[in-house]
Amino acid sequence: MQSLRHDWTLPEIEAIYTLPLTELVYRAATVHREFHAPNQVQGCMLLSIKTGGCPEDCGYCPQSARYDTHVDHQPLMPLDETLEAARAAKAQGATRFCMGAAWRDVPKDGRFERVLDMVRGVRELGMEACCTLGMLNEEQAQALADAGLSAYNHNLDTSPEFYGNIITTRTYQDRLNTLARVRQAGITVCSGGIIGMGESRTQRYGLLRELSNLTPHPESVPVNLLVPVEGTPMADRPKEDPLELVRMIATARILMPQSMVRLSAGRMSLSDEAQAMCFLAGANSVFLGEKLLTTPNPEQDTDQALFQKLGVTLQPANVGN
């Protein structure tokens, strides 16, 4: 039985990540079967409830106000429209509804009260509710917990060593502090990162070390493949080898055996075979729906055809994190 550890070192992580690929995937698949149903994935839906106009300078993000990316600035959505989208997500098989707002910090006004109403409404539909709203303080984290929030997403994005190359408007410690507040409030943690931004393998090991050394591990670990967007500093980044994504997912599965490892942004650039490798390597959660905030995602029919081809089923409600 794979034991839970929170003291992984860079050399240990490197030794796992660089195994021969077939050996790595076999080990990850073995660990996966110890803790999870092998042919089930959690369906999540991500809705942008407030789009664009973010003051931060994240180099990958089309929602930054600093870049001309043709993303229209849209204020916080009305409550009824959000819950209508949640009902549609549930009908598509999603059991978790994620709401993202392009804020640096959670606002201290009526908009936050509306988000709390959204959380309550999603929970009343029998779905898990997740939010990603930027940095938040202890009182806001507790208010979200009291409203019934299931999970809070706040990605570390990359390693501490590479972080300054992509973001200068918020520190790595800011991100860790937010995760600590979420955990203290009793909300489960969703935190992962992005590959393909120009980081080295060693810097990928650094991200995995930060995530796997959190105590407890994040309940959800989204692994994103950079989607280059015109107008951002990373628009011209070359495509990442999909097998690096497989290695990242497999290593995350071995380091954090109980976590849901989510195959997140970048699926549009992956073949069915590459996605199948990711599931074999331990990915057991995906985003459904045609958009992830502002970037494209496979359509419902495409996903249904893929899942049917692979013999994968969506996890029923009230299972998982």
Image: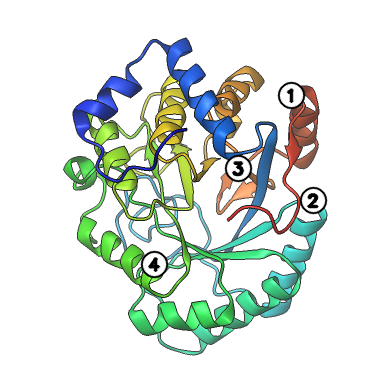
Residue 186, label in figure: none
- Assign a secondary structure to mark 2: loop
Q: Residues within 10 Å of mark 1 (few under 14, many from 20)?
A: some
| Nearer mark to the viewer, of 3 and 4 | 4
In the picture, measured across the screen, residue 90 lies left or right of residue 9, that is right
Q: Which residue is mark 3?
A: 285
Rendered position, 186 above or below 194: below
- Assign a secondary structure to mark 1: helix
Do labels 2 and 3 touch, CB within 8 Å? Answer: no
Whole-percent x, y for residue 77 in the image: 62, 74
Comes first in the chain, label 4 or label 1: 4
Rendered position, 292 above or below 116: above
Comes first in the chain, label 4 or label 2: 2
Do labels 4 and 2 touch, CB within 8 Å? Answer: no
Q: Nearer the viewer, residue 18 or 83?
A: 18
Whole-percent x, y for residue 140 in the image: 41, 81
* Outermost residue to the front: 1
The C terminus lies in quadrant: bottom right
Q: CA distance from mark 1 to mark 3?
A: 14 Å
In the picture, measured across the screen, residue 269 lies left or right of residue 123, that is left
- Tell me which residue sits at (68%, 54%) in the image: 319
Comes first in the chain, label 3 or label 4: 4
- Assign a secondary structure to mark 4: helix
Q: Which residue is mark 2?
A: 92
* Picture quadrant where residue 241 is located: top left
Q: Which residue is mark 1?
A: 310
Q: CA distance from mark 1 to mark 2?
A: 18 Å
Q: CA distance from mark 4 to mark 2?
A: 30 Å
Under mark 2, the amino acid is Gln
